Amino acid sequence: MPRKLAAGNWKMNGTTAALSELASIGHADIDVLICPPATLIAAAAAAAGDGLSIGGQDCHTGISGAHTGDIAAPMLADAGAKYVIVGHSERRTDHGETSETVRAKAEAALAAGLTPIICIGETLAEREAGATLQILTDQLAASTPDDATGANTVIAYEPVWAIGTGLVATTDQIAEVHAHLRADLTARFGAAGTDIALLYGGSVKAANAVEIFATPEVNGALVGGASLKASDFQPIVDALAAS
Ligand code: 13P
């Protein structure tokens, strides 16, 4: 069985004042993660309690070099990160990242001892064209390293049209996609593919978390807006632990 993970992605939000939120986020029984802006990772790792991990939101494919403004995976690890999000749709869109780039970033994360959270998702146009499952198969295959296991890698399904829009995929849509992704993972990785956690992301809130976590093959969530405040995020954490 995959481990359950409740992950928060703060995106480009938060200064040192936001660190006070971390005191009331965490859980003893499941994995809980906050990915703050890179500027806060070291302080967040110092502030986080035992039941909370800290991660990055992106990393470079290399370990060092002349790449102004970029951050290498070993630097995130050195700052106290345990995970790093790679291939978020905002990175794919804003920075033109391809699945091949995302895979190289995931490989860099693994080499640095970080758990990559590899994001995939279809656009509204792709869904309306009936291309969702093929797009996701292609993104998953091209973005995931060959040595991915349940112990070192997490996959996040985030339909682009559901991110930050208040539109949440229906549980039928989530169930269809997660069953498809699980089949892809087991076809490629065999039994190890059954252990890789599959997160759903896109307008997850306390109000919809219980039904999302009751959906087959949903092992957790990647949460944006509702992770910024502990009072919004911790109920999602608790719903996952109780699921
Ligand atoms: P929202 O939860 O704000 O829709 O964002 C989802 C997301 O992109 C998490 O990575």
Image (spheres, rainbow, N blue to C red):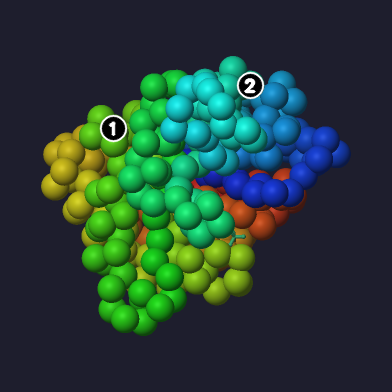
From the top left corner, tell me how far across and down residue 17 is, in percent.
Answer: 85, 39
Q: Nearer the viewer, residue 242 or 27?
A: 27
Q: Quarter of the image holding residue 2?
A: top left
Residue at image position (55%, 64%) is: 163
In the rendered image, which residue does mark 2 sit on?
79
Identify the mark at residue 149; answer none if there is no mark: 1
Residue at image position (26%, 57%) is: 138
Q: Earlier in the sequence, mark 2 or mark 1?
A: 2
Residue 28 appears in the picture as rendered? no
Mark 2 or mark 1, which is nearer to you?
2
- Cβ at disc 2 under 8 Å from ligand 1: no
Residue 192 appears in the picture as rendered? yes
Real-space Cα separation, disc 2 to disc 1, in angstroms: 24 Å
Residue at image position (45%, 21%) is: 112
Residue at image position (14%, 39%) is: 190
- Cβ at disc 1 under 8 Å from ligand 1: no
Mark 2 crowdedness (10 Å alpha carbons): few <14, some 14-19, many ≥20: many
Q: Quarter of the image holding residue 104?
A: top left
From the top left corner, tell me how far across and down residue 208 is, in percent.
Answer: 55, 65
Q: Among all residues in the image, which is located at the extreme right?
A: 17
Q: Say which amino acid is labelled 1.
A: Thr
Q: Say which amino acid is labelled 2.
A: Ala
Considering the numbered disc 2 on the image, is that residue within a helix, a strand or a loop?
Answer: helix
